[in-house]
């Protein structure tokens, strides 16, 4: 019989992986449902959605895409198995910095979107827009804070956990960007 080691959390490594993937798939399902609702509403209220999208700034959203992908690249560097503790810390802090930069750009973008949000001619576009992008923004804030906490005391399990979740946050934005801003 093979001996099992415990991870930092006290759980067997398989349990840590199971919890991670439950979290990943639940996040993807939640955002998937929201994006499908956005697409369906866009079909039902096509003219309102087209008019509302004219108020969005795809250039800022595109900049945010590059910022978040840069952050994800840093997270990937931290997650390398051959990365030293110092490299992990540096990459996690840089990833968090870019996450917070994403938030600043998004809040700046919201400043221009709020004025148009109350107009009935745009249907449910801005309600769904703020729910989807706001929910994502909360994930970015939370993830960036966790990146900093893990950078303070990196362990293999925690680095794997946060970098995997950070990549899910990236994946969600990369899926959301064309649907919300370009379709």
Image (cartoon, rainbow, N blue to C red):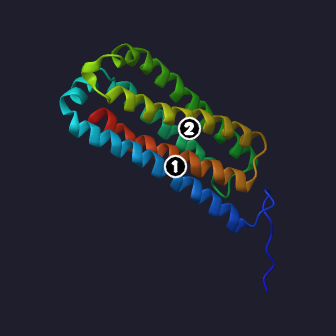
Residue 76 visible (yes or no) = no
The image shows residue 146 at horizontal and vertical percentages of 68, 39
Judge by depth and name the residue closer to the eye, 62 or 183.
183
The image shows residue 109 at horizontal and vertical percentages of 42, 20
Side of 107 where 180 appears, left or right: left
- Secondary structure of residue under mark 2: helix
Is 153 above or below relative to 55? below
Residue name at image x 47 percent, y 47 percent: 30
Which quadrant, please, contains the C terminus? Answer: top left
Which quadrant of the structure image shows residue 51?
A: top left
Residue name at image x 32 percent, y 23 percent: 56
The image shows residue 68 at horizontal and vertical percentages of 49, 37
Judge by depth and name the residue closer to the eye, 77 or 147.
147
- From this viewpoint, which residue is outermost toward the left? 47
Marks 1/2: CA distance? 10 Å
The image shows residue 163 at horizontal and vertical percentages of 61, 49
- Secondary structure of residue under mark 1: helix
Residue name at image x 38 percent, y 32 percent: 128
Crowding at dot 1, Cα within 10 Å, few <14 / some 14-19 / many 20+, comes out as: some
Judge by depth and name the residue closer to the eye, 6 or 153.
6
Residue 16 visible (yes or no) = yes
What residue is pinned by disc 2?
139
Instruction: State yes or no: discs 1 and 2 in contact (Cβ < 8 Å).
Output: yes
Residue 39, numbered label:
none
What residue is pinned by disc 1?
27
Side of 111 where 156 appears, left or right: right
Q: Earlier in the sequence, mark 1 or mark 2?
A: 1
Residue name at image x 44 percent, y 40 percent: 173
């Amino acid at each position: 019989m093979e001996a099992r080691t415990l991870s930092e959390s006290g759980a067997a490594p398989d349990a840590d992986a199971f919890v991670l993937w439950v979290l990943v798939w639940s996040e993807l399902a939640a955002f998937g449902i929201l994006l499908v609702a956005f697409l369906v509403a866009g079909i039902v209220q096509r003219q309102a959605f087209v008019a509302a999208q004219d108020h969005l700034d795809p250039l800022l959203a595109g900049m945010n895409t590059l910022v978040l992908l840069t952050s994800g690249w840093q997270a990937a560097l931290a997650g390398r198995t051959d990365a030293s503790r110092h490299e992990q810390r540096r990459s996690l802090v840089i990833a968090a910095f870019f996450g917070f930069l994403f938030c600043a750009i998004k809040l700046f973008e919201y400043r221009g979107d709020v004025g148009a949000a109350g107009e009935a001619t745009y249907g449910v576009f801005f309600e769904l827009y703020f729910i989807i992008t706001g929910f994502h923004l909360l994930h970015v804030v939370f993830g960036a804070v966790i990146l900093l906490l893990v950078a303070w005391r990196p362990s293999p399990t925690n680095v794997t956990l946060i970098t995997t979740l950070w990549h899910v946050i990236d994946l969600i934005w990369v899926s959301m960007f064309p649907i919300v801003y370009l379709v």
